[in-house]
Image (tube, rainbow, N blue to C red):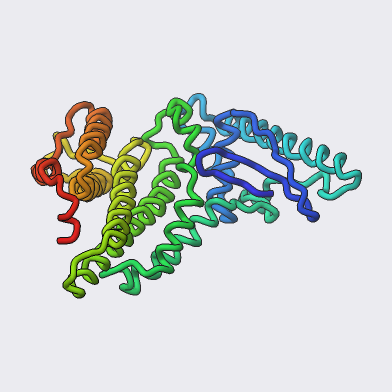
């Protein structure tokens, strides 16, 4: 069984001969949370009590969240999931004219009160993102990303971005009432964890494009004859891609309060904004500088308008740009000469 949890939750059966069939999942928030809760742990066992508390007891009063009621909810949703899977198996076997998948194949595995996904399940999107992130992290720890981003790491970043169609349970999270009270929902941890991996890949991809453009500028200066039109165009393309990547980072990293690293320090003396606020504004400045250097002041205006609207909405109209950001905006709007890219 192949499971996907990024953006849209999907469950797919894969027979030994390669035949596939999608398991139709009823859009029930608790049932999908049950599948996702065990799936994101990817083989790690969890006690029945903790599973019941996190998934079925969340948001309920003590009177409502009795062990009996939570156990009944768990058993009910588990049975419906099993029913969906076994109906899909029957459909696949009937289409094949033979038993390719055992009719009693189960999504769940239990041992001495501990629950996990069955060994036949693979969470393919989380596995792919985590594997690629490990490559990037190893390079960072080894100091390979201090001054430049090597080609093999850029390839890993590109592959990670391709493997990340959206955030963890994104379609469900678009309706926060499914997780009330959402500030204490278990979903926030994996949501933030996989965002970290995605945003890191975005940042290093942007850095790679900047370094490539700077390398072309250095080569032109070393030749002392100026840049030929083809080289200048290539340099602009690198800077343009970098600006777009920084822009995506700036807007995506602060688009949802579910992220545990997105917090504002207004009214809390001695506290700083959360990591997402600090890094998103830094990415904004990078994108603005590059758009200004490219002479695309209309893109500067579009980006800043979208970013400021988003930040004010998230901060209940309390966010204001830093002085550094305002200075960067002013400089970018006055810098309309693309030739400055070669400086």
In depth, the one of 50 and 273 nearer the eye is: 273
Q: Is residue 334 left or right of residue 4?
A: left
- Vertically, is 266 above or below 38? above
In depth, the one of 44 and 83 nearer the eye is: 83
Return the x and y of residue 323 as percentages of the image width and height.
Answer: 8, 43
Return the x and y of residue 211 as percentages of the image width and height.
Answer: 28, 64
Q: Is residue 156 left or right of residue 264?
A: right
Q: Is residue 260 left or right of residue 90?
A: left
Please identify the quarter of the rendering in which residue 329 is found.
top left
Return the x and y of residue 216 as percentages of the image width and height.
Answer: 27, 66
In depth, the one of 42 and 152 nearer the eye is: 152
In depth, the one of 215 and 234 nearer the eye is: 234
Please identify the quarter of the rendering in which residue 209 is found.
bottom left
Q: Residue at x 24, y 43 (%)?
A: 277
- Vertically, is 7 above or below 110? above
Residue 139 visible here? yes
Q: Residue at x 45, y 33 (%)?
A: 173
Report the quarter where the C terminus lies.
Answer: bottom left
Residue 61 visible here? no
Return the x and y of residue 94 as percentages of the image width and height.
Answer: 87, 39
Total numbered labels placed on residues in the image? 0
Q: Residue at x 35, y 36 (%)?
A: 256
Q: Residue at x 18, y 39 (%)?
A: 265
């Amino acid at each position: 069984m192949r499971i996907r949890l990024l953006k849209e939750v999907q469950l797919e059966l894969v027979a030994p001969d390669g035949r596939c069939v999608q398991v139709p999942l009823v859009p029930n928030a608790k049932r999908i949370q049950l599948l996702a809760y065990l799936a994101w742990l990817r083989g790690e066992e969890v006690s029945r009590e903790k599973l019941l508390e996190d998934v079925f007891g969340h948001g309920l009063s003590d009177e409502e969240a009795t062990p009996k009621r939570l156990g009944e909810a768990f058993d009910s949703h588990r049975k419906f999931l099993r029913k969906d899977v076994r109906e899909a198996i029957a459909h696949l076997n009937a289409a094949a004219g033979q038993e390719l998948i055992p009719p009693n194949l189960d999504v769940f595995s239990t041992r001495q009160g501990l629950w996990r996904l069955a060994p036949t399940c693979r969470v393919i999107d989380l596995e792919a993102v985590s594997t690629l992130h490990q490559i990037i992290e190893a390079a960072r720890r080894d100091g390979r990303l201090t001054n430049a981003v090597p080609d093999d790491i850029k390839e890993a970043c590109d592959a990670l971005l391709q493997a990340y169609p959206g955030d963890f349970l994104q379609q469900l999270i678009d309706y926060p009432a499914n997780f009330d009270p959402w500030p204490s929902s278990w979903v926030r941890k994996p949501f933030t964890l996989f965002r970290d991996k995605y945003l890191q890949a975005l940042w290093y991809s942007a850095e790679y494009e900047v370094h490539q453009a700077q390398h072309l500028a250095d080569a032109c200066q070393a030749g002392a004859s100026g840049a030929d039109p083809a080289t200048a165009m290539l340099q602009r393309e690198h800077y343009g891609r970098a600006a777009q990547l920084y822009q995506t980072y700036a807007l995506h990293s602060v688009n949802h309060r579910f992220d545990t690293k997105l917090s504002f320090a207004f009214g809390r003396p001695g506290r700083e904004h959360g990591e997402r606020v600090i890094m998103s504004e830094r990415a904004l400045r990078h994108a603005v500088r590059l758009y200004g250097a490219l002479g695309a002041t209309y893109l500067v205006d579009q980006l800043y308008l979208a970013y400021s609207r988003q930040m004010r909405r998230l901060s209940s109209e309390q966010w204001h740009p830093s002085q550094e950001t305002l200075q960067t905006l002013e400089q970018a709007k006055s810098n309309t000469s693309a030739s400055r890219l070669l400086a």
